[in-house]
Structure formats: structure tokens, C-alpha cells
Amino acid sequence: MSKFINIINISKYYRNNKIVITALENINLEIEQGEILAVVGESGSGKTTLGKITVGLIKPSKGNVIIGKQDLTKVKNPKEIWKIAQYIHQDPYSALDPYMTVDEVLDRPLQYLLNINDKNDRNNMKIEMLNKVDLDEKYLRKRIQELSGGERQRILIARAFIISPKYIVADEPTTMIDFIHRRDVINLLIELKNTYNTSFMLITHDISTASIANNIAVIYKGRLVEYGNSDDIINEPLHPYTQLLMSVVPERLINKSFPKININNEESFPKINIKGCPFVNRCPLAKELCKTKYPDYINIGKNHLVACNLYQ
Ligand SMILES: Nc1ncnc2c1ncn2[C@@H]1O[C@H](COP(=O)(O)OP(=O)(O)OP(=O)(O)O)[C@@H](O)[C@H]1O
């Protein structure tokens, strides 16, 4: 254990009748103070489950999440977790009550989590926070239903940052926003992260969005398949799955093109009792060994981990 946030051997199994779904298996990750870690993977890979576990919204089946010196998986009162760790939902429409005013939305965490009793103090904090997300104090009186998607997203961001948390998970923060405003939201998150020196998990299915992070973790069917600093992952993806993700990014977004990878089509639903490599059925480079052996993590270069039998 060395970094500020330590995600240790996290597994999560969901039971649907008699079927066990492995949403996450033995995930180990670290996030430094002020660092952005992007978690990338396709739909159903386990990103949201991982993000929610790290802020205490879902209990893991196994493993621990340590923030500073506190083990979140052992905290009884979730309020103690939400004082330091916040989650920004991907859908600003369902995450906010349309009938609440912005004032009420921002007031709750100040009262409920920080116990600030002085109304004037809370008011100043709300106005200051609104200004930081480029909205003026007139917004306090507006109801959520009067706001555009982009404005709602800014309120969600303001609600998360208003208590100065040590750690924030932003789950696909730009998915519901029109293309033109996506970069603005990402820039705003980076600016606030820098102001508050917050550790940050950015969940995205889009590896080009992940390029703003310090480090990138690629998840496939609940397994960490590659991890490294974002330049290494983007310029030299090692795992065939990461190479596939890179091959579908338009060249103008990353100034580099990758050869198209022909993969076998297969649904991305996690299998029960995964034996061998989870990517084996889709991988054009799979060997016989990949059907039976889950690859060990190999460190290629400085802090660039890959779990692939091609490198064993
Ligand atoms: N409450 C639940 N009960 C049963 N299965 C679940 C539950 N929540 C998630 N899963 C399953 O766990 C797996 C991982 O889901 P998760 O939502 O974490 O993936 P994701 O990568 O965030 O996907 P998306 O990008 O579509 O949100 C999926 O197969 C999903 O169907």
C-alpha cells in the first residue's frame, strides 16, 4: 500500500436466481492525491460497479478500499464515506429531483454531511460553488426541471465538489451532453480537481476521453487487463482488447491511427466461472493456452501492466 487510494482485491458477484454474474474479479488499483485515473471498458465490463464500490454505494463481495488511512468497506455509517468520497452520476436527468430548487440540492450536503448550521455561511458557499461551475446565483431559485442537460450536469458537479471531498468518481460525465459541450465539462472537472486537489476516477467507454487522465485502467468482463500511464496506454496499447479500443478512435482525436483489428463477435456479458483469458473468444491472437490459463500481470516498462498470455 503506497498511494492515497488503494483498491485492493475487489471482487463483486451478483446473483440472479441460480446464476452468478462476475461483475468484478480481483481488481487492484491505486490513485494518488490529485491524480485522475480513467477506467475504460465497454458496456457491462464492470466500470460503474467498481466506481460505486469505491464510494460505498455498493458493497464488494471481497476486497477493501482504503482512502487515506480509512477502510471504506468497514465503515458502518455511509455518511462518513460521503464526507470524503462523492459520486457524479452519468444521467443528470434521473440523478436530480426535478421539483427541487438548485438551492435545496446544494444545501443538503452542507447541512447533512458538513453540519454547517449558519445559513449565511451555507449561502456564501453555494454562491461560490455556482460561480465555480460558471452559473450565477440566480440559479439558486430555479427548479431542476427548468434547467438544460448541461446545466443539470453542472449542478451535479457542484453538489459533489461543494463539500471539498478527497475523492470523486465521475461516471460517464459527458454521455448525456451534446457533443459541443463535452470538452467544456471535462475541462471544468479538471479545473475543479486541480483547485481541490481531489483524487479522481473518470469512468468512460471512450478511450480518447481517457487521454486526459494521468493513468488508465482497461477493464474487460470484470478483469483489469491493462494499466499504465495514459501516454503509454494510448501510444503503445499492449493488450489486444486495448488495441481494439484504440483502433476505433477517430484519428483526429488522438493524432495517431491504429490498424483496424478484426475480432470475433461475442456478447460482452460476463461468463460464470471465467477460466482462461476473458477475451479469448474475441481475440485474433489467442493461443491454445489462453483458453485455460488466466494470464499473470506482467510489468512491461515502467508501471505498465498487462494481463495477456502473448507477453508471458
Ligand atoms: N444489481 C445487479 N444485479 C445483477 N447484475 C448486475 C447488477 N448490476 C450490474 N450487474 C451486471 O454486472 C455487470 C457489470 O455492470 P456495470 O454496470 O458495472 O458495467 P458498466 O461497465 O458500468 O456498464 P455501462 O457502461 O453499460 O454502465 C453487467 O453484466 C451487469 O449486467
Image (cartoon, rainbow, N blue to C red):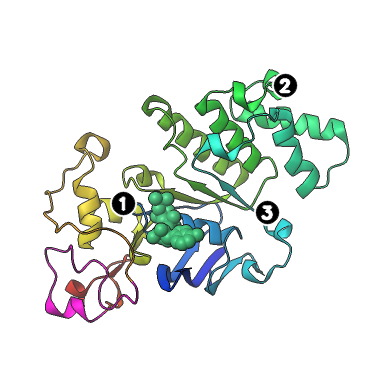
Please tell me whether residue 290 belongs to the stretch shown in magenta: yes
Q: Nearer the viewer, residue 133 or 147?
A: 147
Helix, strand or loop for disc 2: helix
**Circles 3, 1 touching at the beta carbon (< 8 Å):** no
- Compared across the picture, whether 309 is left or right of 74 comes to left
Give the mark nearest the N terminus, 1 or 2: 2
Q: Quadrant of ligand 1?
A: bottom left
Give the mark nearest the N terminus, 3 or 1: 3
Tell me the residue that label 3 is attached to. Answer: 82
Q: Is mark 2 within 8 Å of ligand 1?
A: no
Query: How many numbered marks appear?
Result: 3
Amino acid at dot 3: Trp
Tell me the residue that label 2 is attached to. Answer: 141
Q: Residues within 10 Å of mark 3 (few under 14, many from 20)?
A: many
Give the mark nearest the N terminus, 3 or 2: 3
| Residue 99 appears in the figure | yes
Residue at image coords 73%, 31%: 126
Q: Nearer the viewer, residue 276 or 2?
A: 276
Q: Is mark 3 within 8 Å of ligand 1?
A: no
- Compared across the picture, whether 237 is left or right of 43 comes to left
Q: Nearer the viewer, mark 1 or mark 2?
A: 2
Amino acid at dot 1: Asp
Q: Nearer the viewer, residue 202 or 274?
A: 274
Q: CA distance from mark 3 to mark 1?
A: 32 Å
Q: Nearer the viewer, mark 3 or mark 1?
A: 3
Q: Nearer the viewer, residue 146 or 155?
A: 146
Q: Residues within 10 Å of mark 2 (few under 14, many from 20)?
A: few
**Quadrant in the picture for residue 47:** bottom left
Disc assigned to residue 231: 1
Q: CA distance from mark 1 to mark 2?
A: 44 Å
Residue at the outermost top position? 138
Q: Which residues are magenta?
A: 272-293
